[in-house]
């Protein structure tokens, strides 16, 4: 897993097309966001892979032409329906782009309802042809503040969508109380501690906010890589935050207790560079024992004997090739690792990190 110490050119220019996975709860506003992406004029042309054209309801006045299941929007964006195999659909788009028949710089893949984004992430990694041509840019989950808590209570798949997100878009915050929004955001942060939670109304959000979420890209700004691999939320609330007793608190439902507690996360910051054999042994052991339950694992690692750190990312037992951060500056040589898992105790994940402190 760790890069070879003698390797060079690991961080050469990355020409692969970034892919964003867009998932979300039913009725949360995912379709509204997709329509906004397709209709807005921008500097980048985007190819959106959806399940059915009928599900999104494209405005006819925004369509330039339709041919072979591909819709060209007036904005320059493309929209195509998923027919069968995802790998084949993406490969077809690549071939059409290579031939000059289509033009786009970015892809968005829409998932259906409460579908698990994990298999899509794995498809991008295990298909050698796709891995050469595309890279994972981030997972976006759309959830609404009105019905989201109930959806989480009743569907573990929804909890998994939150846990795997790099960015969570919280919709319909204008129709619920501020305290409901605040409580729900705390719950979302506890499930996905490295994801940013942004509020949006009617899909009104800058497209730039949606892109370049992953720290696993060549030429990434070190601050972005740090943000991608660092917990943004302290799971234990401030014990002095409600001394007056005037702040209304939300009741924890049975569903929340059943589903949320199946998700765990743990993180570590290692002060000194790690020996490559130690890192590989820790990762191999973790994957061997808990691989099927690892939703996301990512980090920035300094290895003993290497001047620059590398970023790594995996889903279950499948990993992206590590990317070296050649533009890292400063004296900070701390490694940062985050693991998000299901059906694994937090304490168990945290104890696994002891292997790195040898």
Image (cartoon, helix red, strand yellow):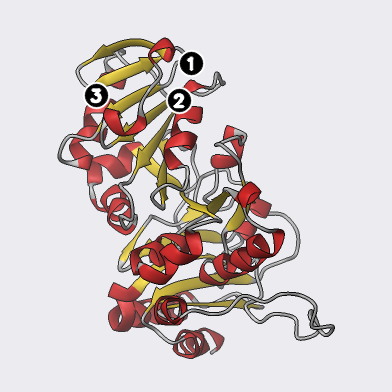
Distance between mark 3 and mark 1 Cα atoms: 22 Å
Q: Nearer the viewer, residue 151 or 264?
A: 151
Q: Which mark is residue 75?
A: 1
Q: Position of residue 266 (x, y in %)?
A: 53, 78
Q: Is residue 256 left or right of residue 91?
A: right
For the residues bearing labels 1 and 2, Cβ distance under 8 angstroms:
yes
- Residue ID at (44%, 89%): 348
- Residue ID at (64%, 63%): 180
Asked which secondary structure carries label 3, the reply is: helix
Q: Is residue 230 visible?
A: no
Q: Which mark is residue 95?
A: 3
For the residues bearing labels 3 and 2, Cβ distance under 8 angstroms:
no
In front: label 3 or label 1? 1
User: Tag 2 or tag 3, which sits nearer the N-term?
Assistant: 2
Q: Is residue 233 left or right of residue 49?
A: right
Distance between mark 3 and mark 2 Cα atoms: 21 Å
């Amino acid at each position: 897993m760790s890069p070879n110490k003698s390797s060079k050119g690991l961080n050469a220019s990355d020409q692969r097309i970034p892919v964003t996975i867009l998932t979300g709860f039913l009725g949360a506003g995912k379709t509204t966001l997709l329509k906004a992406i397709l209709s807005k004029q921008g500097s980048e042309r985007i190819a959106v892979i959806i399940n059915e054209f009928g599900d999104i309801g494209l405005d006819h006045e925004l369509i330039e032409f339709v041919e072979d299941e591909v819709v060209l929007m007036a904005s320059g964006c493309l929209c195509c329906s998923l027919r069968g195999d995802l790998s084949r659909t993406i490969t077809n788009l690549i071939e059409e782009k290579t031939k000059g028949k289509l033009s786009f710089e970015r892809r968005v893949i829409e998932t259906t309802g409460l579908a698990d984004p994990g298999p899509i992430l794995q498809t991008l990694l295990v298909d050698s042809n796709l891995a050469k041509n595309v890279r994972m840019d981030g997972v976006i989950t759309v959830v609404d503040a009105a019905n989201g808590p109930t959806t989480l209570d009743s569907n573990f798949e929804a909890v998994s969508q939150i846990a795997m997100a790099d960015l969570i878009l919280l919709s319909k915050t204008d129709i619920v109380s501020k305290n409901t929004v605040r409580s729900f955001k705390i719950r979302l942060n506890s499930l996905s501690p490295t994801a940013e939670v942004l509020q949006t109304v009617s899909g009104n959000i800058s497209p730039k906010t949606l892109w370049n979420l992953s720290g696993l890209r060549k030429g990434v700004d070190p601050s972005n890589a740090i943000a991608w691999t660092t917990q943004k939320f302290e799971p234990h609330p401030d014990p002095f935050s409600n001394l007056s007793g005037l702040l209304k608190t939300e009741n924890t439902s049975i569903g929340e207790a059943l589903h949320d507690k199946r998700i765990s996360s743990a993180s570590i910051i290692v002060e000194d560079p790690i020996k490559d054999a130690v890192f590989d042994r820790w990762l191999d052991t973790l994957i061997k024992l808990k691989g099927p339950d690892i939703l996301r694992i990512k980090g920035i690692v300094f290895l003993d004997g290497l001047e620059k750190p590398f970023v790594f990312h995996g889903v279950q037992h499948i990993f992206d090739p590590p990317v070296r951060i050649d533009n890292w500056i400063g004296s900070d040589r701390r490694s940062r690792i985050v693991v998000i898992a299901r059906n694994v105790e937090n304490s168990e994940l945290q104890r696994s990190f002891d292997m790195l402190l040898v």
